[in-house]
Image (tube, rainbow, N blue to C red):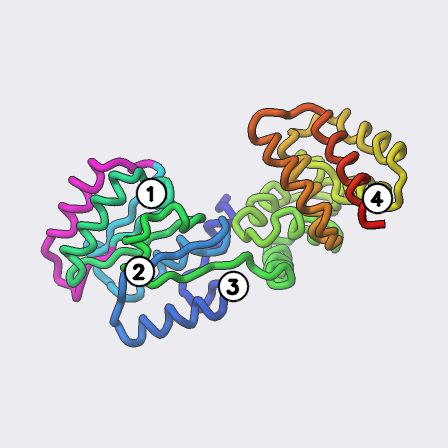
């Protein structure tokens, strides 16, 4: 059985969903065949790597003129000194060669400095497509040599429509609420949405929101929303009791705080979003007890009293 992420992977740039302006910029470069070094940046699952591969394949038909590397695997200076330098000197029957370097924000500073020199020396015969989630981790002299194209999270309505088409083709019996939950859970990440949908293939029963919640092992947004609503309505004691029931299910604290963030964002509780973000930092640093959440709830109540 084919994985959905492979089966429904775009075969051309025209099939990529979302990020219309960025895709139009890529199409212009393809038409002109005048390629600068490119830096694709944005959250996971927004089509950066897929677009890089499709772009290179469209621009240059010769496979031997395209090198694909994942910097999280090959992040050191030796990769620059050997693999990339050797490829940049390689003679091919093409207008130029293309190096796709995925997750390049994981490269060491030394490796980035070495790569900058390769980009300078071989800029005419070898073009780079750098792909990253956080371009602030990319050496500034490298950024200045690239056209930076930003990929945003795909609109939830666009993802919903695409997933519905896939469910119809695959005969996946999913409820409207089940589909909505997947889309909200994955928050604009098409790849993650397909991965969540994967186990639902050949299901003999309707895929509901409750089923998805059990499948992925994250708390229900409805229950998280109930806690936040109680806090907003100054019902701290009831909020603590409601949270205790959620905590008993032993969710990962980081998943739990992420759920609070997503629900607060969806409810446009901007003051709460900031406080949740600070609590998230404490959890990431290793403080993963229930008291982090209790402290968060008291901070929310305190902030509300200031605004009253």
> Toward the viewer: 119 or 10?
119
The disc placed on residue 17 is: 3
First in sequence, mark 3 or 1: give its number: 3
**How far apart are the two marked residues, 2 and 4, measured between alpha carbons?**
49 Å
Residue at position x 58%, y 25% from top? 286
Q: Secondary structure at mark 2?
A: strand
> Toward the viewer: 86 or 180?
86
What residue is shown with label 2? 146
What residue is shown with label 1? 70
What residue is shown with label 4? 305
**How far apart are the two marked residues, 3 and 2, measured between alpha carbons?**
24 Å
Query: Is residue 110 placed above or below 130 in the rendered structure?
Result: above
**How far apart are the two marked residues, 4 and 1, measured between alpha carbons?**
50 Å
Question: Alpha-carbon neighbours of circle 4 within 10 Å: few (<14), some, or many (≥20)?
Answer: few
Q: How many marks?
A: 4
Question: Alpha-carbon neighbours of circle 2 within 10 Å: few (<14), some, or many (≥20)?
Answer: some
**How far apart are the two marked residues, 4 and 3, measured between alpha carbons?**
44 Å
| Residue 245, horizontal then vertical, whole percent | 82, 29
């Amino acid at each position: 059985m084919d994985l959905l992420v492979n089966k429904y992977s775009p075969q051309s740039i025209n099939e990529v969903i979302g990020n219309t302006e960025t895709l139009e910029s890529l199409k212009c470069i393809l038409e002109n065949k005048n390629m600068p070094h490119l830096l694709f940046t944005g959250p996971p699952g927004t089509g950066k790597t897929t677009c890089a591969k499709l772009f290179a394949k469209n621009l240059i038909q010769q496979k031997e003129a395209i090198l694909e590397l994942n910097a999280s695997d090959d992040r050191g200076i030796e990769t620059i000194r050997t693999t990339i330098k050797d490829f940049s000197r390689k003679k091919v029957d093409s207008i130029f060669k293309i190096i796709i370097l995925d997750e390049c924000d994981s490269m060491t500073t030394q490796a980035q400095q070495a790569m900058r020199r390769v980009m300078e020396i071989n800029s005419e015969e070898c073009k780079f497509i750098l792909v990253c989630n956080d371009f602030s981790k990319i050496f500034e002299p490298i950024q200045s040599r690239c056209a930076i194209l930003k990929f945003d999270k795909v609109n939830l309505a666009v993802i919903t429509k695409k997933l519905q088409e896939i469910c119809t083709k695959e005969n996946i019996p999913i409820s409207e609420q089940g589909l909505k939950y997947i889309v909200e859970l994955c928050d604009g990440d098409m790849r993650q949405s397909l991965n969540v949908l994967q186990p639902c293939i050949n299901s003999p029963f309707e895929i509901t929101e409750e089923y998805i919640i059990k499948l992925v092992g994250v708390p229900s947004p409805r229950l998280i929303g109930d806690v936040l609503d109680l806090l907003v309505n100054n019902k701290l004691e009831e909020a603590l009791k409601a949270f205790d029931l959620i905590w008993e299910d032993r969710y990962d604290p980081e998943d739990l705080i992420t759920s609070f963030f997503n629900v607060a964002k969806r409810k446009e509780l901007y003051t709460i979003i900031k406080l949740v973000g600070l609590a998230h930092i404490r959890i990431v640093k290793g403080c993963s007890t229930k008291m982090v959440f209790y402290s968060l709830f008291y901070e929310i109540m305190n902030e509300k009293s200031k605004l009253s």
